[in-house]
Each structure stands twice: as structure tokens, then as C-alpha cells.
């Protein structure tokens, strides 16, 4: 008679969402090696991959380490653990698009460590796509309201408002590039810099509103254009400055009555939106923003397309019916 031997296994997450791997016959204590291997991979890729990719890898490792409370064996990472990680991220208030970025980065790292295409199907049940984001741009009228606000001279709120306006004036320059902007990058009336995220070269002619803000915060004893950082090596200082900047922007937004929360991204989206409404060619907007492809630019202005289509159809109907 044929005998079958069945062993029951199950995977649990405790109240803190820590991964537990137990078997009915014995408890498994895996060799925790994933983070060490992943860090080795990241080190080997620095210098040959985009900084944004490396930053994404490092970010997901910090997050994943908190989830598993330390490290975990590479071989023990399976669909149950990945799904649990997604649930944990959701419980932490992480947005769907950020979860997607984490999952794609984690999948890429795992594939670099163990290049097994079939094993990557464990990510099929978690979110790796993109969700539609609410419109981030503000109008010309709302920008005028920001300009008219009065603050004590060089107060934190005034500084954050001025940096927001500078970002808007400078072709939607990202806050990270403003923070690291140095005086040596200003030559012959132009700002020339390479985007931190993509490495793309961007050239911005300094117009009078930009010149006024630069002069307002000029300091002889600093290599930086604005008093945001003290040196280029401490990313922790940058992260702290960005958080403070975004907190101030939310306060400023409430002061003006702007309905959507102001963030560092709003200036960038607003420049793209206004340029698009002013019939600036998509390729020009893409180059101004330092995008590697016009397809990326479309994510900034996609919410405007329906409005433009409505306008076009209205004009067409007038020619048909009146």
C-alpha cells in the first residue's frame, strides 16, 4: 500500500508584521544574508547606474530591513513575504506609487542576486504599476497670490516661498538641484547643472526675478547659491531640509487658500502645466525639465489633455453647427 507523508508548513506575521517561518516539525532559522548581498550589488553598480536607481535601491533596503526587523535569507523570500511587505507598507501610509517603486526596486535587486526569471513571478500578486495622481499644478492666479504674501524679512516662511518661486522661474528646477546648486555653476548669465535624478544637463538663463532671489540670499562665505546645505556630502541634512521646506509650503498654501497642498513638486508641475497651456512644444518642455524622454513629461501634463481636447472639440462644433 502506498503511504503518503505530509508536512504542514505555514507562514505568519506577528503583530509588528515581522516575518515568521515555522514548520510543524521544527522551526526554521534561515541564514540572514539578503541585505548584505544586496548592499554588495549596490556598491558594484555605483558609478555605472543612474544615481536615482541607486537611491531607490538604498531606500527599499532601509524599508525592507525595518519590515523584517533585521535581515532575512535570500532563499526564504517568497510570495507570502512579498505580499506581507506590501501590506506592511500600506499600514505605514505609503502611497501606491511608492509601493510600486519599492517592489520594482526589490525585484530588480533580487534578480541581480539570483538571476532566476521564473522566481520573479512572486511579484505578480503585488502592485508594480502606476496609479493616476491628482493634479499638482497651481494656476497663474494662485502664483500671484504667493508672490503677494508678506513675511518678516528672511524668515523661514519667506525663504521657503522664495525658493518655491525660484523653482518655478528656473524651468521647474527640482528642490534637490536647488539645494546643491553652487555659485560655480552660474556662468555668463546662465545656470548650468546636471539633474541629480537623471544626470541630464539643464541650462537656465537667469531672468530678473531669479536674479533678485539669488541676490537676496547671497553669502560670501558659502559656495552654495542658497543657504540650505553646508556641504555636499551629507544627504541627511538634505532630507531634513526638504522635509522642513515641504512643511513650510503647506503652511504657506493654507495662508493663500490654495486648495491642494503645496509641495516641492508643485512648482515643477506648475511650470510644465503653464508652458503647455501657452502652447510650448512638448519637446521643449521635456528638455527644460531635464527629462530623458517626452514620455516622462506626459505624466506631468496628462491631466491637462482632457481639457485641451474639450477646447478643441468646442471649436470643431462651432464650425459644424453654427
Image: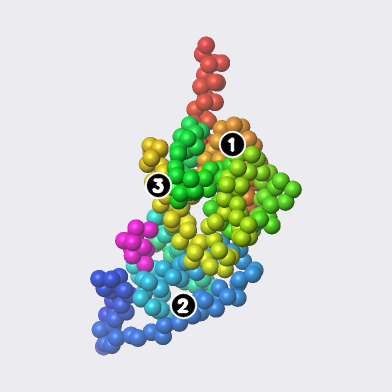
Label 3 element class:
helix
| Dot 3 alpha-carbon crowd within 10 angstroms: few under 14, some 14 to 19, many 20 or more | some
Which tag is nearer the camera, tag 1 or tag 3?
3
In the displayed orientation, state which residue is furthest to the right. 188
Label 2 element class:
helix
Q: Based on the picture, tell me whether residue 87 belongs to the magenta stretch.
A: yes
Percent across and percent down for residue 238 are: 51, 61
Q: What's drawn in magenta, residue-wise?
A: 85-94
Which tag is nearer the camera, tag 1 or tag 2?
1
**Alpha carbon of mark 3 to alpha carbon of mark 2: how far?**
36 Å
Q: Nearer the viewer, residue 78 or 156?
A: 156
Residue of label 3? 250
Number of the label disc, if any, that sits on residue 35: 2
Residue of label 1? 275
Q: Earlier in the sequence, mark 3 or mark 2?
A: 2
Residue 196, can we see it?
no
**Alpha carbon of mark 1 to alpha carbon of mark 2: how far?**
44 Å
Q: Does 234 appear above or below 188?
A: below
Q: Are marks 3 and 2 in contact (CB under 8 Å)?
A: no
Q: Does 114 appear above or below 31?
A: above
Percent across and percent down for residue 298 are: 56, 43
Q: Earlier in the sequence, mark 1 or mark 2?
A: 2
**Alpha carbon of mark 1 to alpha carbon of mark 3: how far?**
24 Å
Q: Earlier in the sequence, mark 1 or mark 3?
A: 3
Q: Going 42% across and 50% down the picture, which residue do you hit?
A: 248
Q: Based on the picture, tell me whether residue 303 belongs to the magenta stretch.
A: no
Q: Nearer the viewer, residue 164 or 317?
A: 164
Amino acid at each position: 500500500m502506498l503511504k503518503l507523508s505530509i508536512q504542514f508548513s505555514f507562514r505568519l506575521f506577528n503583530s509588528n508584521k515581522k516575518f515568521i517561518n515555522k514548520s510543524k516539525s521544527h522551526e526554521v532559522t534561515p541564514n540572514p544574508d539578503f541585505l548584505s548581498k544586496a548592499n554588495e550589488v549596490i556598491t558594484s553598480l555605483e558609478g555605472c547606474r543612474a544615481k536615482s536607481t541607486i537611491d531607490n535601491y538604498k531606500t527599499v533596503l532601509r524599508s525592507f530591513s525595518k519590515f523584517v526587523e533585521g535581515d532575512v535569507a535570500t532563499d526564504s523570500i517568497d510570495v507570502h513575504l512579498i505580499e506581507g511587505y506590501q501590506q506592511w507598507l500600506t499600514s505605514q501610509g505609503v502611497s501606491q506609487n511608492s509601493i510600486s517603486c519599492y517592489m520594482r526596486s526589490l525585484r530588480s535587486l533580487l534578480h541581480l542576486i539570483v538571476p532566476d526569471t521564473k522566481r520573479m513571478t512572486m511579484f505578480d500578486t503585488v502592485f508594480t504599476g502606476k496609479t493616476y495622481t491628482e493634479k499638482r499644478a497651481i494656476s497663474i492666479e494662485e502664483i500671484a497670490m504667493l508672490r503677494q504674501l508678506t513675511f518678516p524679512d528672511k524668515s523661514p516662511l519667506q525663504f521657503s516661498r522664495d525658493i518655491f518661486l525660484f523653482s518655478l522661474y528656473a524651468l521647474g528646477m527640482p528642490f534637490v538641484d536647488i539645494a546643491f546648486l553652487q555659485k560655480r555653476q552660474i556662468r555668463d548669465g546662465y545656470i548650468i547643472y546636471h539633474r541629480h535624478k537623471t544626470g541630464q544637463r539643464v541650462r537656465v538663463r537667469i531672468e530678473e526675478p531669479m536674479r533678485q532671489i539669488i541676490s537676496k540670499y547671497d553669502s560670501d562665505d558659502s559656495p552654495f547659491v542658497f543657504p540650505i546645505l553646508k556641504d555636499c556630502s551629507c544627504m541627511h541634512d538634505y532630507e531634513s531640509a526638504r522635509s522642513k521646506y515641504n512643511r513650510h509650503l503647506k503652511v504657506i498654501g493654507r495662508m493663500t487658500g490654495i486648495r491642494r497642498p503645496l509641495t516641492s513638486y508643485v512648482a515643477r508641475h506648475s511650470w510644465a502645466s503653464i508652458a503647455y497651456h501657452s502652447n510650448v512644444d512638448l519637446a521643449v518642455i521635456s528638455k527644460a525639465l531635464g527629462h530623458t524622454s517626452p514620455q516622462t513629461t506626459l505624466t506631468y501634463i496628462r491631466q491637462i489633455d482632457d481639457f485641451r481636447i474639450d477646447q478643441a472639440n468646442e471649436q470643431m462644433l462651432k464650425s459644424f453647427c453654427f
